[in-house]
Amino acid sequence: MERTVLTKIVDDFNASQSDWRVMIEQFPQAAYNDSVVAAALSGELPDILDVDGPIMPNWAWAGYLAPLTIDPDVLEGFLPGVIGTWNDKIYSVGFWDAALAMFARKSVLEANGIRVPTLDEPWTGEEFDEILVTLKDTGEYDYPLNIGMADKGEWYPYAFPPYLWSSGGDLVNRETYQTAEEALNSDAAIKWGEWWQSLFERDLVPGPSQRLADHQNGFAEGKYALNWTGNWLALSSLETYGDDLLFLPAPDFGEGGKIGAGSWQFAVSATSAHQDGANAFIEFALKDEYFAAFSDGIGPIPPTREAAAMSEYYAAGAPMEVFDELSERQGTLRPVTPGYVVQSLVFQKAIADIANGANVVTALDTAVDEINADIQNNAGYGHN
Amino acid sequence: MAVSGSRLLSSNRAGWTMAAPAFGLILLFIILPFTLAFGLSFTNQRLFSPNPTQWVGMANFDQLLGVSALTLEPERDDAGEIVRDDAGAPTYPRLRGYTRNNPDYPNLVGKQEWFSFQYGESRTYVLASDVVFMKALINTFIFVLVVAPLQGGIALLLALMVNQKLRGINVFRAVYFMPVVVSIVVVSLLWRFIYAGDNGLLNNVLGWVTFGAFQPVDWLGNPDTALPAIIAMSIWQAVGFHMVIWLAGLQTISPTLYEAANIEGATRFQAFRYVTWPGLRNTAVLVLIVITMQAFALFAQIDVMTKGGPLDSTQTMVFQAVERGYRKQDIAAGSVISVILFLIVLSISLIQRYLTREKT
Amino acid sequence: MATVDGQNRTFDRTWRYALLILGAVIFVGPLLFMVMSSLKPDPQLLADTESLRAFLPVGDISLSNYVAAFQRAPVATFIFNSVLVTGLTVILSLFICSMAAFSLVFMRWRGRDVILAVIIATLIVPFETIAIPMLIVVNNLPWIGPEGFSFGWLNSYRVQIVPFISDGLTIFLFVQFFKDLPRELIEASRVEGATWFQIYWRVVMPLSGPVVATAAILKFLYMYNQYLWPLMVTQAEGYRPVMVGLQYFFQLNTAWGELMAYLLVITVPVLLFYLVLQRAFISSIASTGVKG
């Protein structure tokens, strides 16, 4: 689907002018980074490439990307998560964003006397914990909540840091980006880690060896009462539960409810001999009608209000409208630093270790040491 | 022209010419990359970086192999009594107080507990700068030490089984060899279903065989069973190949030797011990060498099935080399592991060669 | 006594078959699961893994996964690439490695022993550990093609073939085999005035059928199952081999049924290759294996 829309944009662009011709090259997503890293090393990058938002600073810092030269006014009114900025320059822009939400069923909440949270008044951390216990005690579910531990990979550092942020911790100190000490192993972070571990110890969520099939279908089959997942699964869940389905904001553990922002974005490679053309194409493609087409085709959130209004799912009164606001109010970028590539892998391991019963303090300290050693090895990653 | 045997066979130019293509390619595609890796292991080279590469000497090796010991006395309350936890075991100060921001222990900075043991009342902690690598090192050795004899032994048993004169034995030979032709990546994907927790295939089959008495095990999710599970799968996949090598060895043993043993009244075991086994000695060396080399390179199974988890129970050296060098973009760190692995395997094969040398 | 003996023998034989069949079940079971799964739609496939139905062709059986797999990825291209790359590598490898082994065993030249020792030592370098430096090397290699002179080998067939032509194990296998050929043959040919290449090609190689089969199968399996390297060096779809094609089935939601179908389809060429060489293979091991 994504390819269909993209092909149309490319055809439109090629037809609209005669200076440039754009062609599409496909990388399978699962191996994307492995494959593109090798291409970058060999100077064989395509002119325009699709890059995961949080990875972008790494590439920009390493000199593989050129800043975009498109008119900044064009980006007026875009969701903050779709604009990729590194050291005060814009390097990438997304045609959509993704958002997380707590998928729930109205009937289940009502039956258990659970209040429906709002963006102004999300569940508090304690309230959330009690809700999970209440749902578990009903005995009707395999687990009260699915957080998708089966989906190893970039899901972990996308889906789980929001809980850490909301508790007052982070992957790295965001003021300097030079250390993770007192960010990832602060008292707040340790408290979060212990709560996180207790989710598994109390059987409130399935552990890392959850079956993929259960992760994919468990909520629809009624095995889980709540599902912490993204807007890309909203459609299929709506098909199952219709009006009964709710997309709830993230719980607030003290610092406000948070969800991750920033998805795949387009950038121009520094080695490209046709940077003008590449920029021209991106600027050409930044049209509400295309955003709406992507959204209708594959379901992501359009980056502008206007495009949302034109889209099938996110227009006023449409079933997924709520995601616009979730994105806008709770969306938080992952640390904007070239070190994120390593930090996300380190975090991923720490999360899994904690879930598997490792000592929380040791796990977080180890993660901090590794992140700090990496920052030092890279001479601070060139933050301005 | 007087021709001697050695003159006939000596030919510097032709000899070099015929060996050159193969050696040249090895030089370019194995020795050169390895030399590069060796050089990089003394630098801070990154895969992606605008920073200049610097010579760092042995720092990478120190970081990887650094180990210290720390002995702690139990905590005492004001009265000098040992503080005990609920289970009655003495409690010790947190290691964190020594390894983090403690100027009195500069040698412990950045180290973490690897393992610890009790001696009297005090407890000794062995700390490593890179616990994950230490675990990878140990796991790799466990894998090699278990797989080499086990896979070789099972392969020999299978070879003896399919070396019988029975109708249809060729079918069994083919069947036992089948997993070998399937890629290890494919096999690993397949076995994730087999090893799944709760309702995985293996749990189901075991439950069915024991009439429900078997308690399901989360094979890959439990630190105690993850590595054994990967060992079992690896053997399943590769054992057929070594079976064929043994089989070939068995078939070269002259039947007259068995007849002689029979006449002497030897039992089956005696026939194996005094006829079969001596005849297989050279085959055994080949099988052992090939399995050991392959076992040290353990990577694909880990990458597809566990990524080193749970709790580092399946970390291996080659997996860590790829993880660090490529995915964490730290070529220097990946190269150090490659160099250490090379040195380890080299010393082992030298020892192996010494022990299995032909005594003259 | 005779009857007791007869009973014993029947009993003995039953036992032997029971053991053999148990072994066969263990080796075939997982593969049977793969075959059956490729015929089922995903929800049923996943549900069936909870029972022994996983091994049976029951429920909604069809070939639709095969059709879908071919639509999802250019399967034919991948198989063609793999067969081409593997085939060429195997042929070149057999030629170049056997020639080197011939030189190392039968000819006397300065530096021979050192070269042999170095080649054997390369046996213990796992490929994964030198993958990245190798990437740097191939990326700086020159090439002269139809478009002229250029640097960098990425996105080509040669980058998948040339680095793997020569390897320690193949040379080692040939060396072990050649050592046991009668030297008189070579000396006699020399006296008759044959060139070295003629001896290699006309005298030694015709005797080497068994070791050629062994080396060919080993190399074929290794090349066909390559994964990490092609992933790193083939950004252009047109050059990708079958194992990289696997990735096409792991998008947001893995298509398990299609994946199983794909796995089966890509295993067929290996099976064919093995069946063709099987006979020569077993007899070849018989002559190489024993000498260790």
Image (cartoon, rainbow, N blue to C red):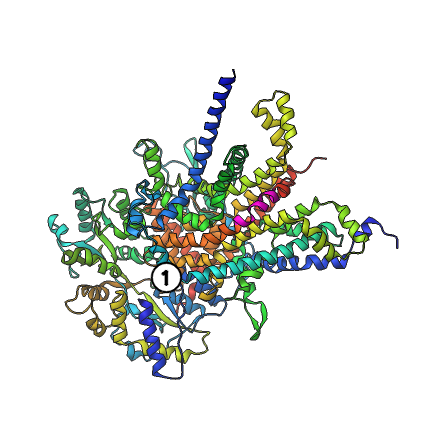
Note whether C171 is above or below B287 in the view shown.
below
Note whether B15 is above or below B206 in the view shown.
below
SS at badge 1: helix
Residue C97 lies in the magenta-colored region:
no
Residue C279 lies in the magenta-colored region:
yes
Assign the magenta stretch its main secondary structure. Answer: helix
Q: Nearer the viewer, residue B99 or C93?
A: C93
Q: Residue at x 63, y 24 (%)?
A: B261
A373 horizontally vs C194: left or right: left
The mark total stands at: 1
Magenta residues, start to end: C274-285
Spot the residue most to the front: C3
x and y percent of residue B151 in the render?
51, 38
Note whether C93 is above or below B264 in the view shown.
below
Q: Is residue B351 visible?
A: no
* Residue type highlighted by circle 1: Arg
Q: Residue at x 25, y 67 (%)?
A: A301
Q: Which residue is mark 1?
A: C72
Q: Quadrant of residue A22?
A: bottom left
A64 horizontally vs C177: left or right: left
Please identify the quadrant where the C terminus of chain B is shown: top right
Spot the residue most to the right: B1
x and y percent of residue B145 in the render?
52, 38
Please identify the quadrant where the N terminus of chain B is shown: bottom right
| Disc 1: CA contacts within 10 A as few (<14), some (14-19) or many (>=20) | few
Chain letter for mark 1, please. Answer: C
Q: Quadrant of residue C291?
A: top right
x and y percent of residue A262 in the render?
31, 65
x and y percent of residue C67 in the render?
36, 58
Q: Nearer the viewer, residue C126 or A289?
A: A289
